[in-house]
Image (cartoon, rainbow, N blue to C red):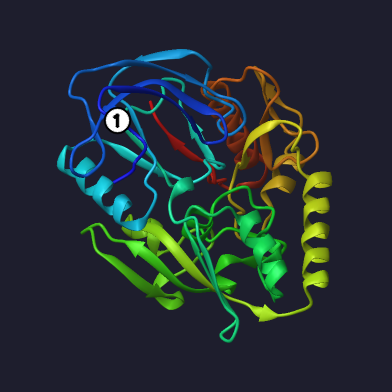
């Protein structure tokens, strides 16, 4: 069992593109990972992935970072955490999460190292990838194999697990358009395969979120095409993203879901909120659908700004904006 921890070992591990748990004390048992009973202080520092969590904030509670490397380790880790009644949160690349200023007390299970495999069936024109694979790595493999269909998702800054769970999309397409089946871990601890229909995809939701399942991997149904043309489309989408989105600043991705019949960014812009700031949190001047961190924004700055955006849009247009960013912690 290799969950990359040892008895009484103090780790410094990268999490979510730059969240570091510097003093998380852990020990191993037969399952591979368990928290110590006593409380241990730890510090967190944020770089890119979770830009709104203050650096060097010290919390006094038991916290552990788990890095399961296969489906069985995920199942065993989750079962253990439930048995010990330890709060936990599953993350991939952490690209659409806002952690409150006091942090998350419990266990972060990071899937980025889980199921790092891609299998191609050329005859069926399908590709299976583990939940921990990034969307760009899958896109690159698709291009090499001459499999088209997921170019639209190549720029989504997350892993397959999160992308499938929330039915992420871009450029008028969504994951439901290419998912054939999904490998999940149920609440009862069963690993099973479910179909596209059973996923009950909706706008930024699926049966995974409704039932608190965990995605372990997915099979994508694709089409044969010229690798050069596939790569050209990936490059085009990448260029569009770089020119239209505020990638020069840290953010947690698109802040609000698209209301039915509207575009969130246009509503925010038309409500006069583009460029509006609370502390170092700002509605992007490039794309009003993003709240960015221009320096040392706290989670509270972001949450206050989000509430003011919602109030302004509601007052002017009567439309309720719902967060797309997931908010965790305390």
Q: Nearer the viewer, residue 162 or 309?
A: 162
Q: Nearer the viewer, residue 291 or 273?
A: 291
- Quadrant in the rendering for residue 250: top right
* Residue at the spot 62% in from the left edge and 53% down from the top edge: 258
* Residue at the spot 71% in from the left edge and 23% down from the top edge: 294
Question: Position of 36 compared to 174: left or right?
Answer: left
Q: Position of residue 220 (x, y in %)?
A: 55, 72
Q: Which residue is mark 1?
A: 6
* Residue at the spot 38% in from the left edge and 28% down from the top edge: 104
Q: Position of residue 212 (x, y in %)?
A: 33, 55
Q: Is residue 261 visible?
A: no
Location of the C terminus (image quadrant): top left
- Quadrant in the rendering for residue 174: bottom right
How many C-alpha atoms fall within 10 Å of the one at disc 1: few (<14), some, or many (≥20)? some
- Quadrant in the rendering for residue 198: bottom left
Number of numbered discs overlaid on the protein picture: 1
- Relative to 76, say whether 327 is above or below: above
* Residue at the spot 30% in from the left edge and 56% down from the top edge: 72
Question: Position of 66 compared to 143: left or right?
Answer: left
Q: Nearer the viewer, residue 310 or 66?
A: 66
């Amino acid at each position: 069992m290799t969950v990359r921890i040892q008895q009484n070992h103090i780790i410094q591990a990268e999490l979510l593109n730059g969240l570091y748990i510097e003093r998380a004390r852990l020990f191993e048992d037969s399952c591979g990972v368990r928290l110590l009973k006593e409380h241990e202080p730890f510090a967190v520092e944020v770089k890119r992935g979770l830009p709104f969590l203050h650096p060097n904030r010290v919390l006094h509670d038991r916290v552990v970072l788990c890095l399961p490397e296969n489906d069985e380790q995920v199942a065993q880790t989750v079962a253990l955490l439930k048995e010990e009644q330890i709060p936990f949160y599953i993350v991939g690349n952490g690209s659409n999460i806002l952690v409150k200023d006091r942090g998350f007390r419990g266990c972060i299970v990071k899937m980025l190292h889980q199921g790092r495999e891609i299998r191609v069936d050329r005859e069926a024109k399908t590709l299976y990838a583990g939940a921990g694979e990034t969307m760009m790595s899958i896109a690159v493999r698709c291009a090499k194999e001459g499999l088209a269909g997921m170019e639209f998702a190549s720029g989504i800054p997350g892993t397959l697990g999160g992308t499938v769970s929330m039915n992420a999309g871009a450029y008028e397409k969504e994951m439901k358009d290419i998912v054939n089946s999904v490998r999940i871990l149920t609440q009862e601890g069963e690993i099973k395969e479910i179909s596209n229909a059973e996923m009950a995809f909706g706008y930024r939701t699926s049966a995974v979120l409704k039932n608190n399942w965990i995605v372990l991997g997915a099979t994508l149904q694709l089409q044969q095409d010229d690798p050069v043309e596939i790569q050209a489309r990936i490059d085009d989408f990448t260029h569009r993203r770089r020119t239209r989105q505020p990638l020069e600043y840290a953010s947690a991705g698109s802040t609000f879901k698209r209301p039915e019949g509207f575009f969130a960014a246009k509503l925010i812009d038309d409500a006069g909120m583009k460029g509006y700031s609370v502390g170092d949190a700002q509605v992007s001047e490039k794309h009003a659908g993003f709240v960015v961190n221009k320096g040392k924004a706290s989670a509270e700055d972001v949450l206050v700004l989000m509430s003011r955006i919602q109030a302004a849009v509601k007052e002017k247009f009567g439309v309720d904006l719902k967060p797309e960013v997931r908010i965790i912690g305390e």
